Image (cartoon, rainbow, N blue to C red):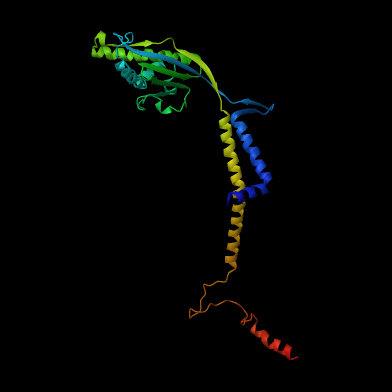
Amino acid sequence: MTFISALKELWSRKLLVALALVIALAAAIVAVYHVNPSGPTLSKRSTSEARGESEILVDSARSPIAGSKRDITGLIVRAGVFARLMGGGDIVKQIAEDAGVPVDQIDVAGAQAHPEEAPGNEGVAETRPYGLAFTELSELPIITVATRAPTTDEARALAAAAPEALRGLIHNVQQKQETPDKEKVELRVLGPAEAAMFTEGPGGKIGAVVFIVILGMGLGLILAIPRLVAAWKRSDSDEEWLAMAPDISEVGETGSHLVIPTSTHLNVNGESRDDRPRRVRQRQR
């Protein structure tokens, strides 16, 4: 089928095309808006969630931050290591405990956290009500903690608990290794944890995609169903023709002649041999 022939066929079925347009438009509206049948009124679909954030500066006892000529490359490397470490199960459990949030309801996204060590790390697609994300800023020894929760208080609590959980872990390691004070890494929180409520909903692009997909499916069905019906009818007629065909399974003794079961023998002209004398007498009269 060419494009022109398809257009002609669709033009001949204008009512069905109009019905497909109406259905596609209705599906796009339902995808973007919530329809209240009692009104009827339209209200835009939306989802609300709280998002929090805190920032952690990775520093040292002899801080190089104050000196303009001091190298901070080592601190930047440590910030990247700590960002990956925070995706581990121990720190996530501590954060959840301090914030009063179920640890199995937290999605963890970070700089390559190990799934076997991070509870819920496989849920990076935000399928759970709570979320934690750890990223390090490029060229700066700063770790950003982003949180997600149903309420602002919970999102703020998660963001505030993250620096303390990391600080406690580092402190325990330093005590076990008896790290000298001048070599210890220190964490500084850059301001208090913040949280706010955000409302989002499907935009016009989602509606356009739904409209195009539904309309394409409708036009495809308009073109395909008549051909399917025609093919079905042809199949039925072929079966009837095969059923009416003579049975060729009975072959004579010589194998070269077919035996057609009939009560009257026909000549080459399709006449019965018994009718030939009668036709001759009629001609003589």
Residue 174 rendering spot, x and y as whole percentages? 27, 13
Q: Residue furthest bottom?
A: 284
Q: In this view, does 255 lie above or below 170?
A: below
Q: Residue furthest front?
A: 69
Q: How many labels does the image show?
A: 0
Q: In this view, does 65 lie above or below 136?
A: above
Q: Residue 189: which quarter of the image? A: top left
Q: Residue 91: which quarter of the image? A: top left
Left or right of 121 on screen, residue 274? right
Q: In this view, does 236 lie above or below 63?
A: below
Looking at the picture, tell me which residue is in the foreground, 89 or 71. 71
Q: Tell me what residue is drawn at x 40 percent, y 17 percent.
A: 144
Left or right of 218 on screen, residue 197? left
Q: Tell me what residue is drawn at x 42 percent, y 20 percent.
A: 132
Q: Residue 178: which quarter of the image? A: top left
Q: Tell me what residue is drawn at x 61 percent, y 53 percent.
A: 229
Residue 115 rendering spot, x and y as whole percentages? 37, 27
Q: Quadrant of the C terminus?
A: bottom right
Left or right of 137 on screen, residue 21? right
Q: Can residue 99 be seen in this view?
A: no
Residue 236 rendering spot, x and y as whole percentages? 60, 59
Q: Can residue 57 be seen in this view?
A: yes
Q: In this view, does 115 lie above or below 265?
A: above
Residue 96 rendering spot, x and y as whole percentages? 41, 17
